[in-house]
Image (spheres, rainbow, N blue to C red):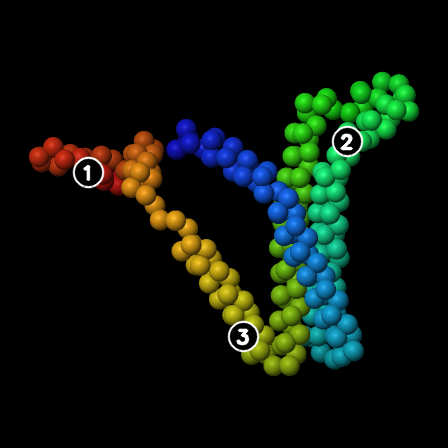
Amino acid sequence: MQDQSKPAMKGLGNLVERITPWLFDVGSWIFGGLIAFHLVLISSLLTVGPVDAAIRISIVALACALPLSVAGIFLLRLIKDVRDIGIDDISLQAFQDAQFPDIEAYFPPSQERESLRRRRSNIALRYSGGIAALSIALTLTGLVAALWHMAWWIGVVLLVMTILSTVLVIVVLAHSLPPESETEKELKKRYMERSGRIRPSIKPGGKTVSRRG
C-alpha cells in the first residue's frame, strides 16, 4: 500500500485544489445560514429572559457560536478575495511602480507565489472547517436547550433526529458511490497480499486462493 499512498495523497491534494472555489462558496453559505439562525434565535430568547437553566445554557451556547460563525465567514471571504485578486502580484507591482528599493527581496519568487496561494487556501479551509464544526455543535446545543425549556423530551427528539438524519445522509452517499469493478477488486487483493494481510495459498489442482493472515 505504500507505493500507492503518495500518489493517492497527491491526487487528493489536486482534487481539493480544483474544488477550492466551490468549498469557499459552500463554507460561506453555511456560515451565513448559521449567523442568520443565531440572530433570530437569540433575539427570541432575549424576550423570554433567563427564566431557568435551559434558557441560560441556550443563550450562552448561541452567544459563543455567533462570533465563531462571523469569524469563519470573514476568514473564508478574506482568503477567497485575496486569492481572486492576486494580492501578492498587485502589492509587488504597486511598490515597483513607486520605485521602492529592492522590493523583490520582500516577496517570494514568482515560481513560489502559486504554491504560497495554495498553502494559504488550504490553511483557511482547514481552520474554517474546525470553526464550522464547533459552531454547529454549539448551535445544536443551544437549540436543544431551548426546546428542553418547553419539554425535555422535545430536546431529546431533536437530538435523536439530528443523529438519524446524519446517518441517513451518510448511507445515501455511500450507496450513491459506483460499485467496485472486478479490476478494482483484483488490485485491492494484490495490495493486501503485498502488505501481508492476505496470504495466497494453493489448493489441490493448482488453483490459487487468498487466505487472510
What is the C-alpha distance between the residues marked 2 and 3?
51 Å
Q: Is residue 5 visible?
A: yes
Instruction: Tell me: 40 left or right of 119.
Output: right
Where is mark 2, residue-wise? 88
What is the C-alpha distance between the residues marked 2 and 1?
59 Å
Check the image and report above or below for 9 versus 80.
above
Kindly state the secondary structure of the residue where label 3 is placed. helix
Q: Residue at x 68, y 25 (%)?
A: 112
Q: In terms of sequence position, does the residue under pointer 2 or pointer 3 come before the other?
A: 2
What is the C-alpha distance between the residues marked 1 and 3?
50 Å
Where is mark 1, residue-wise? 209
* Amino acid type of the residue that numbered disc 3 sits on in the rendered structure: Val
Q: Residue at x 51, y 62 (%)?
A: 166
Tag 1: Cα neighbours inside 10 Å, few (<14), some, or many (≥20)?
few
The image quarter containing residue 1 is top left
* Amino acid type of the residue that numbered disc 1 sits on in the rendered structure: Val
Q: In terms of sequence position, does the residue under pointer 1 or pointer 3 come before the other?
A: 3
Provide residue 94's location: percent of width, then percent of height.
Answer: 86, 28
Provide residue 137's location: percent of width, then percent of height.
Answer: 62, 60
Where is mark 3, residue-wise? 157
Q: Residue at x 72, y 21 (%)?
A: 109
* Amino acid type of the residue that numbered disc 2 sits on in the rendered structure: Asp
Instruction: Tell me: 110 left or right of 12.
Output: right
Instruction: Tell me: 166 left or right of 213.
Output: right
